[in-house]
Amino acid sequence: MKNERVVERLKELQAVPSPSGLTDEVIALLEAGLSAKGFKPRRTNKGALLVSPHPEPYAVVAGHVDTLGAMVSRVESDGTLRVAKIGGWPIPSFEGEYVSVRTLSGPTYRGTFLFDNPAAHVNKDVGKTERTLDNTHIRLDAETDSAKATEKLGVAVGDYVCFDPRLEVTDTGFVKSRFLDDKAGSAVMLEVMERLGPSFRGLPVAFFFSNYEEVGHGAPAGFPPSVKEMLVVDMGVIGKNVAGKETAVSICAKDSSGPQDYELRCRLVALAKKNRVPYVVDVFPYYSSDAAMALQAGLDLRAGIIGPGVSASHGVERTHLKGMKAAAGLLEAYCEDIGARASGKKRRA
């Protein structure tokens, strides 16, 4: 299980911290890896990565490599750090997580995200108090007990805080990690590019790795003008009153922005059935993606969303190898179908 190629790609992506706005390293990793395989990736002006071997792609497949994170918003008088969120993450889920603080001055410091006065032996209300950004902090693993001492380390407002992903692959096939949204989807995209091999170069399909999805403006631009259809590979929702499961690919019928393209959704369902890919059709109640961003920007595209089912989204997430393989199977079938449709149009012409 642990040596599956799609899992290895996920490990590589998770090894590089990439909260929104700090994605150059992970984009460079993708750029180098894809270039070594003979592709010609191109960075957009905003720093996303486009791979389009075909001169006039009909469809774009999009996933995002940016993740949740935080930024130093204040250095406190005791030397600890207050933070502002990057993306929407639940504070209780992140309490106690180890972090790396990337300073603009150069050094990176380790630390822990904690509740204020967290010792149970001195705070009888430690388990009762609601957690907010005003009563949580970063405890640096450095000898500091004042704002002056912390600032002398080079730590300042605006420095990025990267939470540890804690990736673990179990012998039972589960993949546990923060930020499977959407590094699992990006790993699926890389897997499919490798599966398609040389044939990918002849398909009218571009792949797009966006870098600002978690903050709401990931993929509203940067595509070739020929693109008419967009398939987002993100996470499938799992929870109460939804259909998603970790061992299947979710096909989104509707998210917070409204219905996805009906014809494309029906086509995805037909492809899943034809290729015996485990799938569910689902409605995501509190969810947005690069598809919504593209449509809200006014792009004239048909849009759809698929992804492996991810438990505990924006928290300590988990999926299964079966779900990642199902997403890869459906994405591969979709790309081949786009190619077949394009060939059919050429023959009729």
Image (cartoon, rainbow, N blue to C red):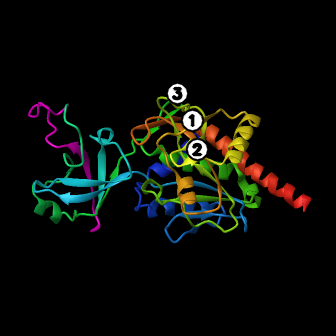
Crowd tier of the residue under label 3, counting other residues whose Cα lies within 10 Å: few below 14, some 14–19, many 20 or above = few
Image x and y of residue 122, in percent = 8, 34
Image x and y of residue 119, in percent = 14, 36
Crowd tier of the residue under label 1, counting other residues whose Cα lies within 10 Å: few below 14, some 14–19, many 20 or above = many
Foreground pick, 227 / 324: 227
Query: Which disc is residue 321 wearing?
Result: 1
Crowd tier of the residue under label 2, counting other residues whose Cα lies within 10 Å: few below 14, some 14–19, many 20 or above = many
Whether the residues at callouts 1 and 3 have beta carbons within 8 Å, the answer is: no
Q: Amino acid at mark 2?
A: Val
Q: Residue at x 44, y 40 (%)?
A: 313
Image x and y of residue 321, in percent = 57, 35
- Disc 3 versus disc 2: distance between alpha carbons? 16 Å
Query: Where 100 sits versus 120, above or below?
Result: below
Quadrant in which residue 250 is drawn = top right
Query: Where 26 sits versus 168, above or below?
Result: below
Q: Quadrant of the C terminus?
A: bottom right
Foreground pick, 306 / 2: 306
Image x and y of residue 217, in percent = 48, 60
Please give the residue where the numbered disc 3 appears in the rendered image: 172
Magenta stretch, residue numbers: 103-127
Please give the residue where the numbered disc 2 appears in the rendered image: 6
Q: Amino acid at mark 1?
A: Leu
